[in-house]
RNA sequence: GACCCAUUAGCUCAGGAGGUAGAGCACUUGACUUUUAAUCAAGGUGUCCGGCGUUCGAAUCGCCGAUGGGUCACCA
């Protein structure tokens, strides 16, 4: 709100109240600190001991019921809401009159005694009330809250005030991330930080955001993955590392994609992708148990059982199960393309056996993978950083985890052969030159690191936002990101 | 990027077969010393998303645009 703008009546009333307080030397914005002794939740949890004992609480006025010489209000603090009882005899005439001018949305501190009302609600009988901050705008309606999705995302601070479920989601998000850290730290993993600004955008197939460094006068990329730096650290001798961090991909936005999102990638020397599967299912089922209290959860009306063990099948087996096509029995790309066409899956005229397998999987299998399922052994064409299978060079030691039809994790036995890796990069470069701007870029220093020598290593990446969606039953990725990417409004 | 839907008071929403807009909450004033969607009485809410057009008249109809949501495409 800028100066000179016409204020509507609601705003004007609050400005006037503030001006009056300032004139009387009671400017709430002059207050610098306050010392609450209790959260609302602590009072509820310990009522027996706290009854009739003095407490100091602080929070936002969410409702107000004035009945002449006595009033009730609800105060929202970080842990919840508690009622206060405000009576003229306790406060005195002047303080009581001033309290009556406070608005819903104002932040107050309350000193008083814990008690239970005649109707049985645990409350605080106010002895003194201090206005700690004046709210100059009205809050959304108490009963329906804030529903407008646009406003909820743009003004998340209001959303958090009036929609308790939103607070819960982000508390759980925090617990999930803390749970992951605890799990990995207790198993000897080292948390590290690698650059966000990259000279080459590698480790995934995605268009990057480009930015510019002024002093060096070079364009740089925001990272699209943490993979290649973390593997350099395995080369360096840290045998178990992980990074939880923001990833940026310049792609479309929908209920599963936000341009910036959070991933965890971890790498473990001397381990393979089977170890990564064990770790993945143990980690996620542990999080569900510890944070939600159950391994059986509901996502958008569907029951999901996260109890171990989870189904493991190869991509070839999955395609066979859901299409009847046995890709193992097919040797030529030509025959594979004919089979795809037969079941109505569009593939290019030059599609390889592996590309056909991947297309069949994506179009015919993914939508069936509701319960947690590891899909193993991805084609080499779509896995430029994964180790080739010894018994079938068309495939790699790679898996993805699917839950509720969505990819949640991606892992490989990491490719550590520098010569093979260089050839894979060159193939990616050829694709890039052929117009695929999501193909990997050549990363000579990463090849150099592999030449120095990387032990056999298992690597795993999990989309934290999607994991939080699953564990909080959130429909959209925007419901688990505090400030999702929004177009600016033109006013 | 394509298509569909939405946008009305601070919030949640009605309404409008074209005649200048309504409810509840919130707000203001008054009554009320245990209420809790407090109650009772009285009162004012407004760029009907923006622009252009049709029309005597547009919030309503048409076109263009903005933002959001959804579906699809893209995202191996």
Image (spheres, coloured by chain):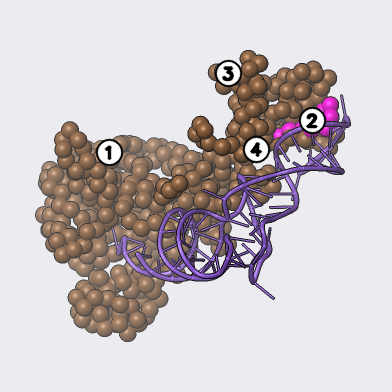
In three-dimensional space, the C-alpha distance between marks 4 and 3, rounded to whole angstroms, equals 27 Å
**Chain A takes which shade in the image?**
brown
**What's the residue at 25%, 63% (across, down)?**
A382
**x%, y% of residue A359?**
31, 71
| Front tag of 1 and 2 | 2
The answer to whether A331 is drawn above or below residue A199 in the figure is below
In three-dimensional space, the C-alpha distance between marks 3 and 2, rounded to whole angstroms, equals 25 Å
> Does the magenta-highlighted stretch encompass residue A69?
yes
| Front tag of 4 and 3 | 4
For label 2, the SS is strand
Reading the image, the residue beneath label 3 is: A31
> Does the magenta-highlighted stretch encompass residue A235?
no
Reading the image, the residue beneath label 1 is: A194
Reading the image, the residue beneath label 2 is: A71
The magenta span reads: A66-74
Counting residues from the start of the chain, the first of labels 2 and 4 encountered is 4
Of residue A488 and residue A239, the one placed in the foreground of this image is A488
In three-dimensional space, the C-alpha distance between marks 4 and 1, rounded to whole angstroms, equals 52 Å
Q: Are marks 1 and 2 in contact (CB under 8 Å)?
A: no
| Front tag of 1 and 3 | 3
Magenta region, main secondary structure:
strand
| Front tag of 4 and 1 | 4
- Chain letter of the residue carrying label 2: A
The answer to whether B10 is drawn above or below residue A58 in the figure is below
């Amino acid at each position: 709100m800028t100066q000179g703008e016409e204020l509507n009546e609601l705003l004007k009333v609050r400005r006037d109240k503030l001006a009056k307080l300032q004139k009387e030397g009671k400017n709430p914005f002059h207050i610098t600190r306050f010392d609450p002794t209790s959260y609302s939740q602590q009072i509820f949890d310990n009522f027996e001991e706290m009854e009739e004992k003095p407490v100091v609480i602080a929070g936002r006025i969410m409702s107000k019921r004035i009945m002449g010489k006595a009033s009730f209000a609800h105060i929202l603090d970080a842990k919840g809401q508690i009622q206060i009882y405000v009576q003229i005899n306790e406060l005195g005439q002047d303080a009581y009159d001033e309290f009556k001018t406070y608005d819903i949305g104002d932040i107050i501190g309350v000193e008083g005694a814990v008690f239970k009302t005649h109707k049985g609600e645990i409350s605080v009988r106010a002895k003194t009330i201090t206005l700690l901050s004046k709210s100059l705008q009205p809050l959304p309606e108490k009963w329906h809250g804030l529903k407008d999705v646009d406003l909820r995302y743009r003004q998340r601070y209001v959303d958090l005030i009036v929609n308790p479920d939103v607070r819960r989601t982000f508390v759980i998000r925090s617990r999930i991330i803390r749970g992951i850290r605890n799990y990995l730290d207790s198993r000897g993993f080292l948390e590290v930080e690698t650059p966000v600004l990259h000279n080459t955008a590698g480790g995934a197939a995605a268009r990057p955001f480009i930015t510019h460094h002024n002093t060096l006068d070079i364009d740089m990329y925001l990272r699209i993955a943490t993979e290649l730096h973390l593997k350099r650290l395995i080369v360096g001798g840290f045998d178990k590392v992980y990074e939880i961090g923001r990833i940026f991909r310049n792609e479309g936005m929908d209920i599963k994609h936000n341009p910036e999102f959070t991933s965890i990638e971890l790498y473990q020397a001397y381990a393979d992708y089977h170890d990564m599967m064990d770790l993945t299912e143990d980690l996620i089922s542990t999080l569900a148990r510890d944070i939600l209290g159950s391994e059986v959860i509901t996502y958008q009306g569907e029951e999901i059982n996260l109890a171990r063990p989870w189904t493991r099948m190869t991509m070839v087996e999955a395609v066979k199960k859901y299409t009847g096509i046995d890709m193992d029995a097919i040797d030529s790309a030509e025959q594979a393309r004919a089979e795809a066409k037969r079941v109505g899956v569009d593939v290019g005229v030059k599609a390889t056996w592996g590309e056909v397998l991947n297309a069949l999987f994506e179009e015919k299998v993914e939508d069936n993978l509701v319960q947690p399922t590891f899909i193993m052994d991805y084609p080499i064409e779509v896995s430029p950083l994964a180790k080739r299978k010894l018994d079938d060079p068309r495939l790699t030691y790679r898996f993805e985890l699917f839950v509720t039809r969505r990819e949640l994790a991606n892992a490989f036995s990491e490719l550590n052969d520098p010569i093979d890796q260089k050839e894979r990069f060159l193939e990616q470069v050829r694709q890039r030159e052929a117009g695929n701007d999501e193909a990997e870029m050549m990363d000579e220093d990463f090849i150099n690191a592999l030449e120095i020598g990387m032990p056999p290593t298992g690597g795993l990446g999990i989309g934290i936002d999607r994991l939080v969606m699953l564990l909080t039953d959130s429909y959209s990725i925007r419901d688990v990101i505090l400030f999702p990417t929004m177009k600016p409004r033109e006013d």
